[in-house]
Image (spheres, grey):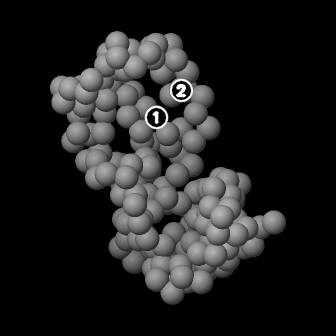
Amino acid sequence: MRHDKDYDFDNGFRCVSDLVKNHNYTMELLEVLVVTDAKNRYSFSPDKTKIRANYGHSKWIKIDWEEGTPPDVLYHGTAEGAVESIMQTGIESRSRTFVHLSVDEEMAVTVGARHKKNGKPCILVVNAKQMHEDGIKFYLSGCSSVWLTDYVAPKYIEQVVRCS
């Protein structure tokens, strides 16, 4: 049973005690999840009484993301069927609160492969340096391999790399 006291809606946290007591998790399992998740998606509060997803929320969660200077180039994984539309309208957050950009092509391919019903995975190369110089904000997601931004206009997409 969900209790509002078990959630910190402003910061995206959920009480560890609720997960342990009501959902068959153990503290050890949660610690392993935080440490071993390949995308570094989860984190604890400083006192380890709460846990949250660092990014990928479908609802607006107020998290004090660290604004930062991204690498010069970032990558966005998508499916071949979405490329034409993206080149016209840009990369939008859609059902997520932010656009997710990867620091390497490998992660972008993994993301693009999730959309296989729309064709082969494709990687979009994004000129993050120019975006940042133009005043567009970037946030480090709590994971050094994923950067967040509100939107990527088509003019910042430098290249489309098709993958097989």
Residue under the point 39% across and 77% down: 134
Residue under the point 42% across and 39% down: 53
Place residue 45 in its image quadrant. Answer: top left
Q: Which residue is mark 1?
A: 42
Place of residue 131 in the rendered image (x, y in percent of width and height, measured from the top left): 45, 74
Residue under the point 59% across and 75% down: 82
Circle on res. 75: none
In the displayed structure, would residue 163 be above or below residue 67? below
Query: Type of residue at label 1?
Result: Tyr
Dot 2 alpha-carbon crowd within 10 angstroms: few under 14, some 14 to 19, many 20 or more: some
Circle on res. 33: 2
Measure how far apart labels 2 and 1 are at the Cα level: 7 Å
Query: Type of residue at label 2?
Result: Leu
| Total numbered labels | 2
Local SS, label 2: helix
Q: Quadrant of the N terminus?
A: top left
Place residue 116 in its image quadrant. Answer: bottom right
Earlier along the polypeptide chain: callout 2 or callout 1? 2
Q: Is residue 155 visible?
A: no
Place of residue 37 in the rendered image (x, y in percent of width and height, measured from the top left): 58, 33
Local SS, label 1: strand
Place of residue 85 in the rendered image (x, y in percent of width and height, measured from the top left): 54, 82
* Circles 2 and 1: CB atoms closer than 8 Å: yes
Would you say 135 lies left or right of 130 here? left
Q: Quadrant of the C terminus?
A: bottom right
Residue closest to the eye, 11 or 147: 11
Residue under the point 71% across and 54% down: 106
Residue projecting furthest to the left: 5
In the displayed structure, would residue 103 be above or below residue 118? above
Dot 1 alpha-carbon crowd within 10 angstroms: few under 14, some 14 to 19, many 20 or more: some
In the displayed structure, would residue 135 be above or below residue 48? below
Would you say 22 lies left or right of 41 here? left
